[in-house]
Amino acid sequence: MTTPAGMTERFEAFDPDRLVEIIAAHADMDGPLLPILHGVQAAFGYVPQAAIPIIAGALNLTRAEVHGVVSFYHDFREAPAGAHTLRLCRAEACQAAGGDALAAHAEQALGVPFGQTTADGGVTLEAVYCLGLCASGPAALVDGKPVARLDAGRLDRVIASLAS
């Protein structure tokens, strides 16, 4: 299977039987919810809404409790991400180094606001609050790899590289 950007699909399609396997692999742990959610996201690329009642039932939690954890932690996705992720630091140190203008430029260059994916499914733009690269901001994670000392020109080159 390929994504709209032509890349090989990185994740499995949601399958309730596979979800049950993930739950079973972690159910005997103390505090299994977070490991289960990480396993679900690693398998499917996000935590599907259909998974929440199944996880809740298996752990004797309410759906609201499971949803609360998914929505609280920014690393959990409630929808599939694009083929690439651009996580731009929005913390104070990066803002002081021009991060606000860079954030506006990223939204304009990609044509989507933070938290959204481009229409072609190519790039998901996300905010992250501190990458630990404060001395070399503005910074971002591009598909999990840090990129520092960003300006509009360098960001444009990063975005162009994601399209190729």
Image (cartoon, rainbow, N blue to C red):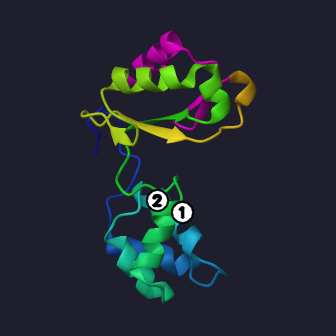
Is residue 155 positioned above or below 14 on the image? above
Q: Identify which residue is drawn at 64% across, 24% down.
A: 96
Q: Identify which residue is drawn at 46% across, 74% down.
A: 66
Q: Is 44 situated left or right of 134 in this image?
A: left
SS under mark 2:
helix
Is residue 93 positioned above or below 32 on the image? above
Which quadrant holds residue 20?
bottom left
Farthest top residue in view: 153
Q: Give the range drawn in magenta.
A: 137-164
Q: How many angstroms separate mark 1 from mark 2 (CA)?
A: 5 Å
Q: Where in the figure is residue 12, as x and y percent of width and height?
A: 37, 57
Q: Are marks 1 and 2 in contact (CB under 8 Å)?
A: yes
Q: What residue type is labelled 2?
A: Gln
Tell me, yes or no, if residue 57 can be seen here.
yes
Give the residue at mark 2.
41
- The image quadrant where one finds the C terminus is top left
Say how many tags the image has: 2
Q: Where in the figure is residue 151, as x and y percent of width and height?
A: 55, 14
Residue 118 is covered by the magenta coloring: no
Q: Where in the figure is residue 68, as x and y percent of width and height?
A: 47, 69
Give the residue at mark 1.
38
Q: Is 12 situated left or right of 128 in this image?
A: left
